[in-house]
Amino acid sequence: MRSILAVFSFFFAIILFAQSESKIRIIHADLNLGRKVNDEQLRILKGSVHVLKDTINMYCDSAFYYESRDKIELMGDVYIDNGVRKLFAKKIDYYPEEDLAECFWNVKASGKNDSLFSQRLIYNLKTEEASATTDVYLWSKSDNAIILGDKAYFNNNDNYFRVTGNSHFIQLDSTTKDSFEVRAVKLEYFSDTLKYVIATDSVRITKGNFKAYSDTA
């Protein structure tokens, strides 16, 4: 009887999710419960959770789906993969209608050529745009460069990254072992074919014994 109820609960959850416009599907969860909290229907998933929305795979330790708000709270070791970029965090609030992921704590957004790290990240999986705050830095694998700052904006489609507040660009030179560094209030990094950096306000450039100062570079 218990196994029959478990199977019924599983298929009820799939039907419930399918009826909403979000098209969320439960692929796996060790525990699957439906509950009403403060007149709001809540779906609780725990243990090796795997849910799917279109081509976006989401994995976590536990998840809470708020039907009326069309919001999923993913908790634990959270991992989202949309085929372009992988998101890792301790908590992610995902909004299916907007394809928006709000990530918290030990956040990493990893792509083919770069990885963006922070403690808080808002990432639009549809437009490939992101804003990040706290302990922000971007590692560019193709350019062997690191960019740090207080706040950041990232647009994957435009190959554009902007940091403000204590901005610092570091590019390692494997030949001379000297790093090329740029410090400024704001840094804009373009990682397309030209690959260049625009620095604004209180600019300081160093490489080995070379030093230069400017308002803009």
Image (cartoon, helix red, strand yellow):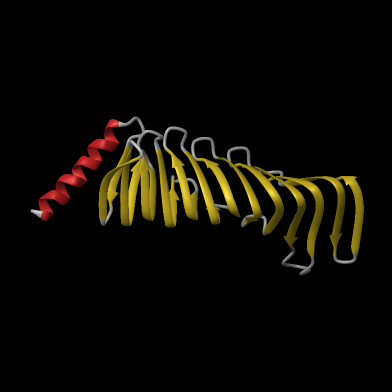
Residue 70 or residue 167, whichever sits in front: 70
For residue 118, what is the image quadrant?
A: bottom right
Residue drawn at 47 percent across, 49 percent down: 92
Q: Residue at x 19, y 46 (%)?
A: 9
Answer above or below: position of 208 versus 1: below
Q: Residue at x 28, y 48 (%)?
A: 27
Residue 68, can we see it?
yes
Image coords of residue 46 (percent x, y): 32, 55
At horizontal 91% and vertical 48% (from top left) the residue drawn is 214
211 on left or right of 100: right
Percent across and percent down for residue 80 are: 44, 50
Viewer-nearest residue: 59 or 160:
59
The percent coordinates of residue 194 (x first, y second) are: 71, 44
Which of the 4 image quarters holds residue 137? bottom right
Residue most toward the left? 1
Left or right of 109: which side holds 63?
left
Direction from residue 97 to residue 187 in the image, left or right: right
Please provide percent x and percent y for residue 89.
Answer: 50, 55
Q: Quadrant of the C terminus?
A: top right
The extreme front residue here reads 38
Is residue 192 left or right of 177 when viewed as pictured? left
Counting the numbered discs, the total is 0
Q: Is residue 111 visible?
A: no
Q: Nearer the viewer, residue 7 or 40?
A: 40
For residue 46, above or below residue 161: below
